[in-house]
Image (tube, rainbow, N blue to C red):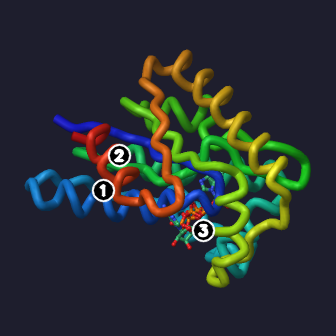
Amino acid sequence: MGKRVVVTGVPGVGKTTVIEKALALLGREGITYQPINFGTFMYEVASEEGLVRDRDEMRRLDGQTQKRLQKTAAQKIAGIEGYVLIDTHTSVKTPTGYLAGLPEWVLRDLMPDTIVLVETDEDQILLRRLGDETRVRDREGAKGIAEHQQFNRALAASYAMMTGCTVTVVRNPDFLLDNAATDLADVLR
Ligand code: AP5
């Protein structure tokens, strides 16, 4: 018995915040998910190999290295059983273009039941990035953020074609974090 839900969203959309709140809601009902951060699995290997100093540097590594780190992370996560929530990216914006976050060799290992896209308006994401001093966010305008969210929807559709998983959008607008957490908890139940 188990379920695998992949939660994605462009940097700054607030996916980690929504995940934490949704898991707290479910915890009150005795439903427990194991939260897994895909980037952390990649980062452990990348930092051990001396490739990066922080997790935000990973998206600027050469494509082959990023793919190798992806593959290693997916293989490790595939071994985790039960109710698993994987916090990751539908695509990663790299200096040479969008890198699929869940290419075929990652999907084959993860085989999610559902992919969630956390979204909100691009101007809100821009302001959240500017206000978050804990991370090294890429500088990008609202149009670029909108394009990234659009591209993620297209990619998620292709992931659904490959695996038969469902795809759903959870909106996380300003001042409505509680609604976003309730919506995500509904998907996870
Ligand atoms: P990852 O760790 O996933 O980085 P991230 O998405 O940039 O950041 P967070 O997880 O912190 O999420 P978030 O920015 O959406 O939200 P937060 O809750 O902080 O990935 C790191 C790296 O790993 C990637 O760059 C990539 O290199 C690599 N990676 C990962 N998966 C990969 C894959 N599959 N393939 C290849 N590489 C991969 O919120 C942001 C701010 O918004 C906060 O200040 C928060 O308080 C605020 N906020 C949230 N919700 C609201 C709201 N409703 N109203 C107002 N403010 C809000």
Question: How far apart are labels 3 and 2 at the CA level?
Answer: 26 Å
Amino acid marked by disc 3: Tyr
Which disc is residue 33 wearing?
A: none
Name which of mark 3 and mark 1 comes first in the sequence: 1
In the picture, measured across the screen, residue 122 lies left or right of residue 6, that is right
Tell me: 83 left or right of 157: left
Q: Residue at x 72, y 57 (%)?
A: 123
Q: CA separation, marks 3 and 1?
A: 25 Å
Residue type for callout 2: Leu
Ligand 1 occupies quarter: bottom right
Tell me the tag on residue 184. 2
> Where does residue 56 sit, x and y in percent of width and height?
70, 70
- Where the C terminus falls, by quadrant? top left
Q: Quadrant of the N terminus?
A: top left
- Residue placed most toward the observer, 143 or 1: 143
Determine which residue is flagged by label 1: 22
- Say what secondary structure mark 2 lies in: helix
Disc number for residue 43: 3
